[in-house]
Image: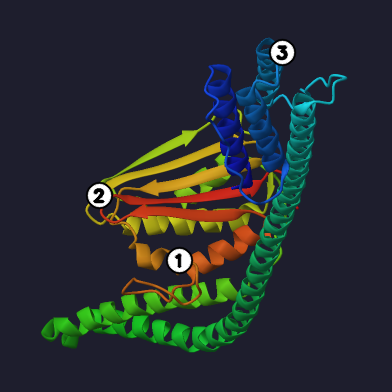
Amino acid sequence: MGKTLGKERINEIIEAIIKVARGDYSVQIKLTGKNDEFDSIAMGLNMMIDDLKAGTVGLEYAANRIEEIINVIQKVARGDYTAACELGSQNDIFDALGIGTNMMIDDIRSGVEELHQTNEELRAANEELRATEEELRASNEELEAANEEIRETQEQLIRSERLAAIGQLAGGVGHELRNPLGAIKNAAYYIKGKIAKSELGQKEPRVVEFLEIMDEEINSSNKIINDLLGFSRVGKPSVALTRIEEVIDDAISHTPVPEGIELTKKLIENLPEIEIDAAQIRQVLVNMITNAVQAMPGGGKLTIEARGKDDFMEVAVADTGCGIPEGVIGKIFDPLFTTKAKGIGLGLAVCKSIIDRHGGCIEVKSRVGEGTIFSIKLPLKAT
């Protein structure tokens, strides 16, 4: 605001001087009553105009001095604050006007320097504020990372405790059920053998059918018991250098693949050996291949890939089956969670536990109606 008013006063003074230089001696510059440099210059100019009007000053001398003052004021208006009016030895009105102009220039220069200093201080304050914001942002990111790590550690601890409790329960239940179930299976087998050749078997063929259903259900129950015992027995891996191709072939040989499913292996040549527990990783692959087959009851494509990447081995099992709903994917590795009519939801929990114990990770991508991909990432060297 002050700077704008200063320019307006300078322009007003310049216009008045130009009018006088053209011979208009009726000009009078208004005083603001602030008694500042501008009022001092205005008073001097008004006195000079009065002297010119009275003819007490030589016109040529006055014109030269006026032109000099105008040039100095124009330089200042363009930002040259080093300009100054030269003072004569006559101590006349023009010298007084030059002194006032020089005082005005000094004040303007001081104001500009103060403004520059204020701008520098503001710039420094902004830099300091920016640095503080960066530090706060970095601190927030570190806190978020620390909180995420704590959250993951807590979830892993809770999961480990849950798995341990379920494992103890599964082991106890499995042992308690296996023996009586074995006795029932043997009894059903004996009865079936006797009845099949007897008169009762000829008259009541449904008795034999019911005994066969009983045998199938006993086998199904045995599988559940085996899953329970397998879950409770997952221990520390006994690692050894192994060729992943052999583990994959072994898993495929232990898993019946129906004729309607096209099996494709994509194994990169000369894969490096990997330090794993071959039996445990085979168990993981058998479970994943079985799940893939069950997801394609009407047939489809089953693809198994393996490749080395950096210091890791990646194995993927992909199917073109029904897919997994988005709301279910986050739960499939939880113990006792299942979407199948038969089963107790321990297969994938066991798989994740085995992969975790190997220092690896397991991920799943799926689209309903398109298929599912399970990806296993294992370090080449045991951790």
Q: Position of residue 269 (x, y in %)?
A: 56, 28
* Residue visible at 25% across and 57% down in the picture: 297
Select label 1 or label 3 by which is in front.
Answer: 3
* Residue 19 drawn at (x, y percent): 53, 23
Question: Does residue 187 sit above or below 46 in this rendering?
Answer: below
Element on which disc 1 rests:
loop
Say whether marks 2 and 3 touch (CB < 8 Å): no
Horizontal side of residue 292 vs 125, given as left or right: left
| Residue appearing at x 74%, y 31% in the figure | 101
Where residue 200 sits: x, y (%)?
Answer: 17, 88
285 or 62, which lies in front? 62
Q: Vertical placement of 252 versus 6: above or below? A: below
Dot placed on the residue nearer the N-terminal end, 2 or 3: 3
The label on residue 299 is 2
Sequence-earlier tag: 1 or 3: 3
Residue 198 visible in the shown view: no
Disc ID at residue 61:
3
Residue extending farthest to the top is 60
Residue ID for mark 1: 330
